[in-house]
Amino acid sequence: MASEAVTSDPEDSNRLDTLGFICNRMSRFQEARKHLEHALASQGIDNPDILEHLGDTYSKLGDAAKAKTMWRNALQKREAAALKLRQPALIERLQQKLAAQPN
């Protein structure tokens, strides 16, 4: 269904993110990277979910530096959000990912 949704609107960053997230969960990391990088380029630069998912994919692909960059950007977006939108659990999850990733 996610693939069909992207086919119907290939520039929708939320649909691309969903498809990339699914590919990541299915261990199809190269495909996930392609969809998530496209989502980021399609107006997803301010979306902390896309940034986090792309960081997760980079981590699975063994690129710790890119993963940390994406997670830091996602964390900054989350912390900058209005207080009612910050979602402390998501901020803590990002902080844990950054702490667990080797330098």
Image: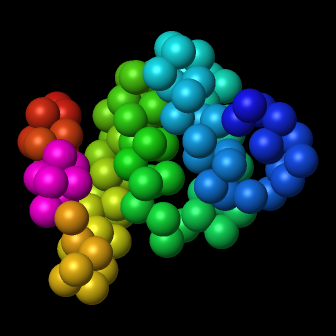
Q: Is the magenta stretch mostly helix, strand or loop?
A: helix
Residue closer to the observer: 82 or 58: 82
Q: Is residue 92 above or below residue 22?
A: below
Residue 73 x %, y %: 35, 63
Residue at the (59%, 41%) spot, across then down: 18
Q: In this view, does 98 lie above or below 74?
A: above
Residue at the (49%, 71%) spot, across then down: 46
Residue 70 x %, y %: 39, 52
Is 3 left or right of 14, judged from the image as shown? right
- The furthest residue to the bottom: 82
Q: In which quarter of the image is residue 2?
A: top right
Residue at the (83%, 35%) spot, across then down: 4
Residue closer to the observer: 48 or 7: 7
Quarter holding the C terminus is top left
Q: In this view, does 89 lie above or below 1?
A: below
- The furthest residue to the right: 8
Residue closer to the observer: 59 or 3: 3
Q: Is 39 a magenta residue?
A: no
Q: Is 89 a magenta residue?
A: yes
Residue 58 x %, y %: 44, 33
Could you tell me if residue 80 is visible in this image? no
- The furthest residue to the top: 27
Could you tell me if residue 71 is visible in this image? yes
Is 24 left or right of 60, judged from the image as shown? right
Q: How many marks?
A: 0
Quarter holding the N terminus is top right
Looking at the picture, the colour scheme in use is rainbow
Q: In this view, does 11 lie above or below 63?
A: below
Tell me the magenta residue range.
Answer: 88-95
Residue 31 x %, y %: 66, 25
